[in-house]
Image: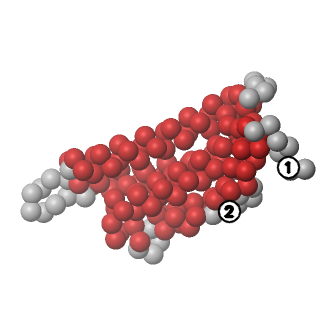
């Protein structure tokens, strides 16, 4: 699931980037990609997505290596991706404006898909409880 939601968020960000590169203002001839505030927003979204991607990769590497400390990272990677995916898709839609809300636009599907991320089992809340239990030395599944 982590990889799926990373992929959806990545697709949404790439769609917004493509849109901003192509969107031009008739009064100035400039593209939306030339606006510093939009450059900043894209940079911040990329940073958020990449930080979360690296958590998932590090968790996977630690798990594959049999690292005894991998469990909190593995549990947290899906919950972090769920939060990040929702944020990235929402913000990418904001960057694209009304066009992203049109019927049949890929962003409509991306938003629907990522809204499921926090509630797909195990839910984000449950993963955070389990992470806390592991870190506090408590039984993962309770007593």
Q: Is residue 61 above or below residue 137?
A: above
- Element marked by disc 1: loop
| 24 sits to left or right of 101 | left
For disc 1, the neighbor class at 10 Å (few under 14, some 14 to 19, many from 20) is: few
Say which of marks 2 and 1 sits in front: 1
Name the outermost residue toward the left.
27
Q: Is residue 80 visible?
A: yes
Count of picture labels = 2
Asked if marks 2 and 1 touch (Cβ < 8 Å), the reply is no
Q: Is residue 5 visible?
A: no
Whole-percent x and y of residue 94?
A: 36, 62
Whole-percent x and y of residue 116?
A: 63, 63
Residue at 73% in and 55% down: 126
- Element marked by disc 2: helix
Marks 2/1: CA–CA distance: 18 Å
For disc 2, the neighbor class at 10 Å (few under 14, some 14 to 19, many from 20) is: some
Residue at 52% in and 64% down: 111
Say whether disc 2 or disc 1 marks the residue closer to the N-terminus: 2
Residue at 40% in and 57% down: 92
Q: Which mark is residue 54?
A: none
Q: What residue is disc 2 on?
A: 119
Q: Is residue 86 above or below residue 41?
A: below
Whole-percent x and y of residue 69?
A: 74, 29
| 94 sits to left or right of 133 | left
Residue at 37% in and 55% down: 16
Q: What residue is disc 1 on?
A: 141
């Amino acid at each position: 699931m982590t990889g799926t939601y990373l992929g959806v968020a990545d697709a949404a960000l790439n769609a917004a980037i493509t849109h901003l590169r192509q969107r031009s203002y008739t009064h100035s001839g400039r593209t939306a990609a030339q606006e510093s505030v939009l450059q900043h927003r894209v940079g911040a979204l990329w940073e958020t997505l990449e930080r979360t991607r690296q958590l998932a990769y590090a968790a996977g590497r630690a798990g594959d290596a049999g690292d005894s400390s991998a469990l909190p990272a593995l549990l947290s990677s899906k919950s972090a991706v769920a939060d990040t995916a929702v944020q990235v898709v929402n913000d990418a839609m904001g960057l694209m404006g009304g066009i992203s809300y049109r019927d049949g636009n890929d962003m409509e599907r991306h938003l629907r898909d990522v809204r499921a991320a926090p509630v797909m089992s195990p839910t984000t809340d449950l993963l955070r409880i389990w992470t806390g239990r592991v870190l506090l030395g408590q039984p993962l599944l309770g007593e």
